Image (tube, grey):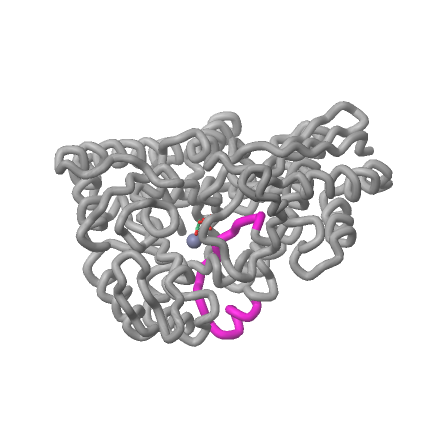
Amino acid sequence: KIQKVLATEILDSRGTPTVGATVILSDGSVGTANAPSGASTGKFEAHEKRDNDRKRYLGRGVKKAVEGIEETVAPVLENMQRVTVQNIDRMLIELDNTKNKEKLGANATLAVSLAAAKALAAHYKQPFFRYLGGTNAQKLPVPMMNILNGGAHAANNVDIQEFMIVPVGAKSFSEAVRTGSEIYHTLGGILKQRGLAVSVGDEGGFAPNLASDEEAIEVILEAVSSAGYTTDEVKITLDAAASEWTANDGYLLPKRGTKYTSAQLIAYWEKLCEKYPICSIEDPLGEEDWPAWTTVTEKLGKKIMLVGDDLFVTNSTRIREGIGRKAANALLVKPNQIGTLTETLAAVELAKENGMKIVMSHRSGETEDTSIADIAVAVNAGFIKSGAPCRSDRTAKYNRLLRIAKENEMDEMYGTGK
Ligand code: PGA
Ligand code: ZN
């Protein structure tokens, strides 16, 4: 039985309020979880409830989301008969009773959903990933480490939001983390030597001003090689977050002022993929540009992953639409885009059944919460992106995976993205 459901207004990695939940079972088992928060949020994401009271936290407070948990959710869950993850999430969805969690807020429902699931894992004396995934959880994900930040996550002149390194050639998860860290520090050294800024963006990657996207990729490749790795061992991944570029009649890159039609943008990605060891591009096109997504998947889908983030928003209805249109071949999974653990797992299942790859993901606003690390292992996700190998809000997830690897002798059960 659930004895108590509590919620707290806490701070995220940007110093902005977010929702923390605690669920206590009658046997004393405790689960806690925090909601993350995006900056380049998709138009079709579940609702994030904010107070919009300018007198508190510049309008960004989450007091109403906290009150919703304490006044609407807690009394019902504390009287629940059969306490399971599915029943709790079904109840959250029923209590909210809107299309996109407009009433309670996905920040409220997700925090409770994850905290309750973790309390149940504690009750069954199992690690969270094992409780969720059972004996099927057999693989550690390949990290996509965001070492150079642009777009809405950095105050520099780079329009592509994320430049990530992917240690596909590592023999184990711990080697992958070491590879990422070595390249990150090497990159910092190179930037410093050139008199470029080594301040970091929201996800811990460096955020220098650069002449072009190509210069960003080239300086990263230089770091890969001077850290002693080949481009067979370490690939590049981009998150364009192109929904942010959507303009009236195509795309306008806000920082550089460059204009593209969908076709020109696709040609640009083709050119970059010809020239560089890119293994994946996330949101290469806008969230409503379905026909162009189909075209880019046709043209590049055999060679690289085309990952739908804002396109799918972890929403099974939108994933189904994508499958029908043959748009994208990989799913970015952000639990707060949909608002419950059960709906997140359903989205993953649907994508997998249709041959799509899975990339588990943090948000640019994060906390010390490590749920996504456990979920990634539970569903055997091919990849996880949790930012740079730097800053505790980012490394908490990698560190959790290192501990899962150690405690369960899984370090060498490393996916290599296959
Ligand atoms: P967000 O960025 O959390 O600011 O949406 C992450 C991403 O786009 O993948
Ligand atoms: Zn994205």
Residue in the image at 64% along x and 53% along y: 343
Q: Is 96 left or right of 19, judged from the image as shown?
A: right
Q: Is 225 left or right of 351, judged from the image as shown?
A: left
Judged from this view, the residue extending furthest toward the left is 194
Q: How many marks?
A: 0
Q: Is residue 363 magenta?
A: no
Q: Residue 342: horizontal and vertical position, in percent?
A: 66, 50
Q: Using the image as rendered, state which of residue 364 and residue 297 is in the foreground.
A: 364
Q: Residue 303: horizontal and vertical position, in percent?
A: 32, 63
The segment highlighted magenta reads 320-336
Quarter location, residue 203: top left
Q: Is residue 323 magenta?
A: yes
Tell me if I can see residue 410 in this picture: no
Quarter location, residue 348: bottom right
Residue in the image at 33% along x and 71% along y: 299
Q: Residue 42: horizontal and vertical position, in percent?
A: 50, 58
Q: Using the image as rendered, state which of residue 195 and residue 231 is in the foreground.
A: 195
Judged from this view, the residue extending furthest toward the front is 55
Q: Quadrant of the N terminus?
A: top right
Residue in the image at 45% along x and 53% along y: 40
Tell me if I can see residue 414 in this picture: yes
Q: Residue 208: horizontal and vertical position, in percent?
A: 24, 42
Q: Using the image as rendered, state which of residue 413 and residue 122 is in the foreground.
A: 122
Asked if 4 appears above or below 48 in the picture, the reply is above
Asked if 325 appears above or below 161 in the picture, the reply is below
Q: Using the image as rendered, state which of residue 248 and residue 341 is in the foreground.
A: 248
